[in-house]
Amino acid sequence: MKWQTKVALKELVTTLVEYPSITGSPDEVAFPEHVKSLLDEFPYFKDHPEYVQTHPLKDGRQLLTALVKRGEEKKTVILLSHFDVVGVEDYGTLEKVAFHPRELTKEMYETKETLPPQVQQDLAKGDWLFGRGAMDMKSGLALHLSMVERAIEGAFDGNILLLTVPDEEVNSLGMLTALDVLKQLKQEEGLSYTACLNGEPMFSQYPGDPNYYVYSGSIGKLLPGFLSYGKETHVGEPFAGLNPNLMVGYLAEELELNETFVEHRDGESTPPPVSLMQRDLKVEYSVQTPQAAVSMYNVMYMRQSLTEINNKLRKAAERASLKIKAHYEQKASAFLSGRPELKLPNMSVRVYTYDELYQEAVERHGDFEVERRQNLLMSLREGGDRDFSTQLVYEVASLCKDLAPMIVLFYSPPFYPSVSSKDDPYIRGTLQHVMERAEQEGITLKEIEYFSGLSDLSFIGPASSPSSLDALLHNMPLSGKGFSLSEELLQAFQMPILNVGPHGKDAHQWTERLEMDYSFTVLPNLVSETIQKLLVS
């Protein structure tokens, strides 16, 4: 077999990294064909070409499945990975070699004195491979390909279905498309899916973390946005209006790192909210203040309901609105000191959810007119999901501009449900078995319930938050307009999940690296043990 040694796996992951499959790039479109060409070389797939397939997404990208069947056996473990990677602008002068692991790794070792201290410490005691995607997550795909090879040789008492998808780093359209593919394969091949095993790399819990982890779930993520719709004015008359840039500033004060959103569970904690976007919507320079600004925040959750989070976000916006009004009045009072004859407009800031403002617009202009305007924007769409969500909200706000100044809470893709199999005896037994086998290899594996790096397991695992999606979808402008998600879709294909992946560090950073002694020496057998345990339990 060709992918069963450390040297062979290093060579395999190197060739995978050399295909720069950045999300949304032509190389992401072509990558599944490369993987298919590797699998087509096996006599098994020459005899069964129908078992290796690429499947189209609605935008022209592809996902890939590869099935290895064991006779009439129905039990099947899904091996899940993604092959898209983030961009390489952060590499600076090393950008040209970011997708060339041999050259980049050599450069890193030769110039290690110039690297961050933690990287220097790692290089002094480990065998590391650098490159964009080496850790996140083409090493996981390489391991799964080696498991396919073992399955062909009869290593497992059941079936293996390799599933590797695009777009995980942006909207998970690959995984959402895969749900229908899995349903079709289940019917056509008579499969019974017992579990989904992901190969995402383990994430450090703190700088210098020496531990090795496995995961029984994956964290949830929301992307709430706030449209601050102010009152424009000439800069020579600043108190005749309200600048939305001031408004987003007070929203940031309320939301950035806000501890009330942090969830604690069995020693695990979600990170607090952080801003991912904050800018006004003014296109050209002039001495008129902007009319609107937008800010978006990363909010992660474990067990909280979406309604609870939505209420927290709204209350934060309401607190910000009071501070904005107080700021305006205090500055106006200081500016107009001694001139009591001058009267200023009321700058109370209203707070709406998108759904509330949409219903207000419908009441004023009729459902047909509001829908017509949004359909027109759809026909002219150019921007990505975040920008287009903002555009749709702005259009509705402009229909009710007399309500300004106002803050409108909405949501944009991506959305990742929180999922967990921690309390499933089937998964508990599997993880206990794997951790015991790791101890025999001198490795202590620690279980974490929620993989914190976000993963496509969110769309196939059991929901850990029982809440309805209504609070999210009713306030998501793109729901039904390019983004499709429903309770039925998420519940149709729930199965036990776990994540056993490689050891690496600094995902999405220019120092992204894979530790190969564990990942390609110890881990292959642990993954194999995990698969076998899942099939026979």
Image (cartoon, rainbow, N blue to C red):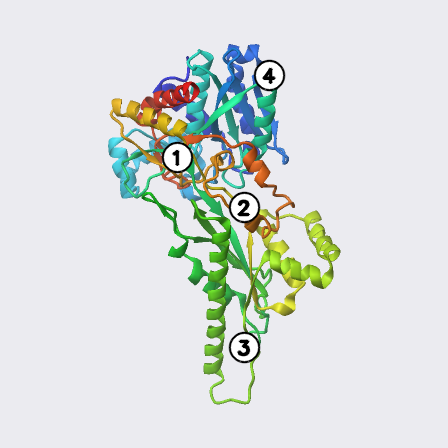
Task: Name the residue located 62 percent from the left edge and 46 percent from the top edge.
Answer: 479
Across and down, in percent, residue 260 comes to 39, 56
Pointer 1 or 3: first along the chain = 3
Mark 2: amino acid? Ser
- Please name the residue that numbered disc 1 is placed on: 422
Q: CA distance from mark 1 to mark 3?
A: 56 Å
Q: Determine which of the numbered discs, if any, sits on residue 50 in the image.
A: 4
- Please name the residue that numbered disc 3 is placed on: 239
Pointer 2 or 4: first along the chain = 4
Element under disc 1 = loop
Mark 4: amino acid? Glu
- Please name the residue that numbered disc 2 is placed on: 468
**Could you tell me if the residues under marks 2 and 4 are in contact, i.e. CB atoms within 8 Å?**
no
In the image shown, does 115 or 513 lie closer to the viewer?
Answer: 513
Element under disc 3 = helix
Element under disc 2 = loop
